[in-house]
């Protein structure tokens, strides 16, 4: 009887061995029950289930020890089996550009060999607003957020798609949907032309580590500037930002700037300009609340002098032979017998473009009856980029003298001394050594997208200060 039982067991063992060979049945590794390449002991430490083959920490996996069952499974349901995510060329070595078998949106579209699971079909891996299942029907790539059928958008696109510019026409995808243009057609966008109407400035990726950052603001509208073409002259009309700062420009029948008004909250400041027969500014009257100040200007050769109501010299401007500003001196009066003053010197290149500004400060010490001089209290250098025509140069040059005479109108972000007054855009680097922590400001223009006529549709300004860094994205609209 025992002999018969032994023969029966032996026969069954032989049969099992034969089946193992024919069907390549795997033996269970007692050290890794689920065959996911992570030992039972490690799974207990990781808090994963050693009996469920899709519950594991990928970083703790030893791929050569994974079972065939695990390799041929699709843990994340993306239609790519685990083996093809890690070792597509079957050399038992993890591919350098492997994808994760635990991330349903990390896969190579062409490697899909099994049917994806329902949760993958209903998801939108690339965030373009078209579900993965619909993209398979449309035969578009569910991992490329700029390859989709617009009419198939059935989900809310994500923030990355919103602020991408799929057709590279200078208008991001979200803006194109808002303006009812096609985000996939580079010839379909709003604002094409040569006469600049609006400049919109957006904050993008703004970092402020000093005040507790970094934090990110994606495409937050910061300001808008409006322009018009009158009597053949391109000019500023108004400026407004999201903080309630508004600047408006008014002109006379000769297209001369006659007033600038700044409204900030409940406060309004207005500067009025008077001209002589040569259209030179001879007086400015500034009204701020109940306060009024008048400055009279005198012209003598290449010198412009400004005097306050007490007939005190408060401004002196020297022009060079090309009519460009060479130096500007501001005077402030205290109880001292002599004023304090600061003087800025300007340098130009062979094309008459501003390339450097250096400011020195003179403080009068009554006790010694002498000045202390601080050289280089601030300075700026400009570098010009031939990448794009500057559509604001004419509007800026029209009122450039006004900018030098009255700093108020420089509140509009585009109204500075050099960046917008020449044919090209100019990046600026400034420093303020006496400021807290050694102040500095750097601004570099990049990401130009131009029309065929050379005028920009999109420009990025990457800036940094001692307080943080970020980017301003400018969009230009023409007619």
Image (cartoon, rainbow, N blue to C red):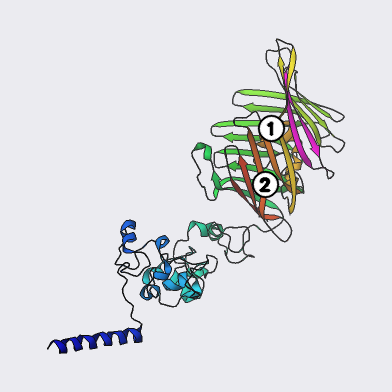
Q: Is residue 56 visible?
A: yes
Query: In the picture, residue 441 is in which quadrant?
Result: top right
Decide whether residue 20 is among the magenta residues: no
Residue at (23% x, 86% y) in the render:
10
Q: Could you tell me which secondary element the residue under label 2 belongs to?
A: strand
What is the residue that sits farthest to the left in this orientation?
1
Helix, strand or loop: magenta stretch: strand
Q: Could you tell me which secondary element the residue under label 1 belongs to?
A: helix
Query: In the picture, residue 453 is in which quadrant?
Result: bottom right
Of the numbered discs in the image, which one, if any, rests on residue 407? 1
Q: Provide the residue designation for mark 2.
A: 444
Of labels 2 and 1, earlier in sequence is 1
For the record, the magenta segment spans 339-361
Of 289 and 300, nearer the camera is 300
Of 61 and 408, nearer the camera is 61
Q: Nearer the viewer, mark 2 or mark 1?
A: 2
């Amino acid at each position: 009887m025992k002999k018969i039982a032994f023969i029966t067991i032996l026969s069954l063992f032989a049969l099992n061995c034969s089946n193992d060979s024919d069907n390549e049945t795997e033996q269970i590794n007692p050290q890794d029950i689920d065959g996911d390449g992570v030992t039972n002991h490690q799974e207990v430490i990781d808090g994963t289930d050693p009996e469920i083959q899709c519950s594991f920490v990928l970083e703790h996996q030893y791929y050569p020890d994974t079972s065939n069952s695990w390799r041929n499974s699709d843990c994340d349901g993306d239609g790519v089996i685990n083996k093809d995510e890690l070792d597509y060329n079957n050399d038992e070595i993890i591919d350098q550009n492997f994808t994760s078998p635990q991330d349903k949106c990390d896969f190579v579209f062409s490697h899909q060999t099994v049917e994806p699971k329902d949760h993958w079909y209903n998801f939108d891996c690339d965030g373009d607003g078209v579900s993965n299942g619909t993209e398979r029907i449309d035969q578009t790539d569910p991992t490329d957020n700029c390859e989709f059928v617009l009419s198939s958008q059935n989900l809310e696109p994500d923030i990355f798609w919103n602020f991408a510019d799929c057709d590279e026409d200078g208008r991001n995808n979200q803006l194109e949907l808002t303006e009812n243009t096609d985000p996939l057609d580079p010839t379909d966008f709003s604002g094409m032309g040569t006469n600049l109407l609006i400049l919109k400035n957006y904050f993008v990726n703004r970092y402020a580590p000093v005040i507790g950052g970094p934090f990110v603001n994606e495409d937050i509208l910061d300001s808008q500037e409006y322009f018009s073409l009158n009597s053949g002259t391109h000019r500023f009309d108004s400026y407004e930002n999201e903080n309630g700062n508004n600047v408006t420009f008014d002109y006379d029948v000769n297209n001369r700037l006659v007033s600038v008004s700044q409204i900030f909250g409940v406060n309004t400041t207005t500067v009025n300009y008077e001209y002589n027969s040569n259209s030179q500014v001879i007086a400015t009257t500034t009204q701020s609340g109940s306060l009024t100040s008048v400055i009279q200007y005198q012209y003598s050769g290449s010198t412009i002098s400004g005097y306050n109501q007490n007939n005190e010299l408060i401004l002196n401007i020297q022009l060079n032979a090309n009519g460009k500003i060479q130096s500007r001196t501001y005077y402030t009066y205290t109880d001292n017998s002599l004023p304090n003053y600061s003087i800025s010197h300007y340098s130009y290149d062979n094309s008459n473009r501003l390339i450097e500004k250096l400011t020195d400060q003179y403080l009068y010490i009554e006790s010694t009856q002498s000045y202390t001089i601080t050289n280089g209290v601030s300075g700026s250098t400009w570098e010009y980029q031939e990448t794009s025509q500057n559509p604001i140069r004419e509007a800026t040059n029209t009122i450039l003298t006004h900018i030098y005479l009255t700093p108020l109108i420089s509140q509009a972000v585009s109204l500075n001394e050099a960046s917008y007054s020449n044919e090209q855009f100019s990046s600026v680097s400034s420093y303020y050594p006496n400021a807290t922590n050694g102040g500095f400001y750097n601004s570099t223009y990049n990401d130009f997208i131009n029309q065929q006529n050379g005028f920009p549709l999109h420009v990025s300004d990457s800036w940094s200060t001692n307080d943080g860094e970020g980017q301003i994205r400018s969009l230009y609209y023409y007619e």
